[in-house]
Amino acid sequence: MSIIKENIEQINKKIEASAEKSGRKREDITFVVVSKTIDVPRIKEAVETGENNLGENKVQEIMDKYEPMGEGIKWHLIGHLQTNKVKYIIDKVELIHSVDSIKLAEEISKRAVQHGLVAKILLEINIANEESKFGINPKDAERIVLEISNLSNIMIKGLMTVAPFVENAEENRVYFKQMKQLLVDINSKKIDNVYMDVLSMGMTGDYEVAIEEGATMVRVGTGVFGARIYPNKN
Ligand SMILES: *Cc1c(COP(=O)(O)O)cnc(C)c1O
């Protein structure tokens, strides 16, 4: 078996074990295979295992890989999205994880109306208030959910976060707990049209802890494909 397939098998076992620890089943957790920077042949190897949720952080990469990867893929946009690029992916993605402003949500709504579809989104939360990160301050989340809930053809499915980069995943447990609490708090407000149940959190270094704390979706790249090689930025 290829290393990619072996990695996926191992990760699936860990997802199952962590889900059980939190009283859930493997099928309650969506495994998003993060394929950014990875070429189509290697992504296809991953998809052969049956995993068909792919995460990309750039609009351009989704557009480049969309045709070659063919049907049956659920594309997840997990990186920062500029309003002027919404039009390129609105009819291609299963879920936009990275909505971080009302302005962006308005553009998504507008494009969704044009295409006659309902766009599913998550609100990205900057749970640790890191200056380097995108995402909404947790204090503003409820107000923003309320505003977005009035827009047409857009459905808020839940929350997403990119937790701090840490050596020891346990350090992020507190943030994962806060994310879960935020989701519960917002749902308890019973806002019209808002019922959120997706919690997208946990990456290669910390997805097990994230699941233990309530993640329903994990985004794992390096753990599947190995370290990413970025083109020289000079
Ligand atoms: C790259 C990326 C991931 C995957 O990170 P790994 O550490 O490689 O698993 C997850 N989420 C987002 C938003 C990313 O950009």
Image (tube, helix red, strand yellow):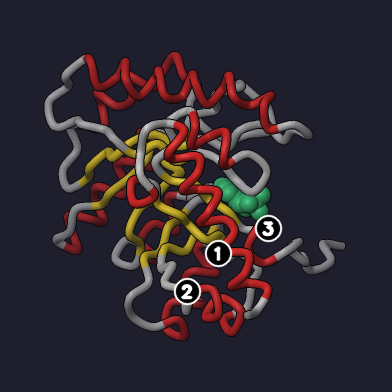
Marks 2 and 1: which is nearer the front? 1
Marks 3 and 2: which is nearer the front? 2
> Disc 3 versus disc 2: distance between alpha carbons?
17 Å
Image-based side of 58 in relation to 96, left or right: right
- Where is residue 152, by image quadrant? top left
Task: Indicate the position of residue 142 as horizontal and vertical percent values.
Answer: 33, 19
> Disc 1 versus disc 3: distance between alpha carbons?
14 Å
- Where is residue 89, by image quadrant? bottom left
Marks 1 and 3: which is nearer the front? 1
Which is nearer the eye, 18 or 162? 18
For label 3, count other residues whose C-alpha is less than 10 Å away and answer few (under 14), some (14-19) or many (20+): some
In the picture of the structure, the residue carrying the numbered disc 2 is 49
Which is nearer the eye, 142 or 103? 142
Mark identifier at residue 31: none
- The residue drawn where x is 63% and y is 34% is 133
Where the N terminus falls, by quadrant?
Answer: bottom right
Q: Say which element carries label 1.
A: helix
Q: Say which element carries label 3.
A: helix
Label 3 or label 2, whichever comes before in sequence order:
2
> Disc 2 versus disc 1: distance between alpha carbons?
8 Å
For label 2, count other residues whose C-alpha is less than 10 Å away and answer few (under 14), some (14-19) or many (20+): few
Vertical position of residue 166 compared to residue 12: above or below: above
Vertical position of residue 8 compared to residue 67: above or below: above
Mark identifier at residue 9: 1
- The residue drawn where x is 57% and y is 81% is 40
In the picture of the structure, the residue carrying the numbered disc 3 is 222
Amino acid type indicated by mark 2: Thr
Q: Is mark 3 within 8 Å of ligand 1?
A: yes
Q: Say which element carries label 2.
A: loop
